Image (spheres, rainbow, N blue to C red):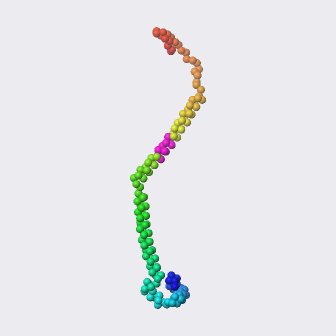
Amino acid sequence: MDCVKFAKVLSLAASDNEAESVRAMQIAKRMLEAAGLDFVDVANLVVAPAACAESEAMETLRDKLALLRRENRQLKGENRRLRSDSATPTQEDTQIARLAAEVRRLTATSDYLSGELERSEYERYRIAAEARKVPLVKAASPIPRRSCRSSEGQYKLF
């Protein structure tokens, strides 16, 4: 007899629906008769569960399940501990982060200064081009210069 199926049928006997409950008891009685048992034998099995081979297998499975659950709890605790340990940054990690920030700052400064250099070169070329475009203004009339000879024999301009 399949003990698991028998247990399911007996659980249906607890139904609030009277017809379903009566039908479940009839099926349970038929299953017991097919196995050569009756409800008195079932009552004895409840008192002495070791008599059923499947109940021993279930007990073994329960023990294994308890061991696996305990191991699972231990592994979860260890996992949490490892994650919390690795979440704390080391001094080396802090130094690396600080240096990375410094590199980003220096890169930004370099980019800014490159832009300023380009703007100043552009301004220099613009001013040089303007200087080439503006013609030199000639004096309308030459400034009259007079010269005289000094006592040393040199000429001086006034």
- Magenta stretch, main secondary structure, is helix
- Picture layout, residue 36 above or below residue 68: below
Hey, which quadrant is residue 59 in on the image?
Answer: bottom left
Provide residue 99's location: percent of width, then percent of height: 44, 48
Q: Which residues are magenta?
A: 104-113
Q: Nearer the viewer, residue 129 or 88?
A: 88
- Picture layout, residue 17 above or below residue 147: below
Hey, which quadrant is residue 133 in on the image?
Answer: top right
Q: Nearer the viewer, residue 155 or 121?
A: 121
Provide residue 70's location: percent of width, then percent of height: 42, 71
Indicate yes or no whether the magenta region holds residue 73.
no
Residue drawn at 41 percent across, 57 percent down? 88
Q: Nearer the viewer, residue 18 or 1?
A: 1
Indicate yes or no whether the magenta region holds residue 112.
yes
- Picture layout, residue 120 above or below residue 65: above
Provide residue 43's location: percent of width, then percent of height: 45, 88
Residue drawn at 44 percent across, 71 percent down? 68
Q: How many marks?
A: 0
Residue drawn at 43 percent across, 86 percent down? 47
Q: Is residue 113 visible?
A: yes
Q: Is residue 12 visible?
A: no
Q: Is residue 15 left or right of residue 74?
A: right
- Picture layout, residue 31 above or below residue 124: below
Residue drawn at 56 percent across, 33 percent down? 125
Q: Is residue 100 left or right of residue 141?
A: left
Furthest toward the left, the residue is 91
Provide residue 127's location: percent of width, then percent of height: 55, 32
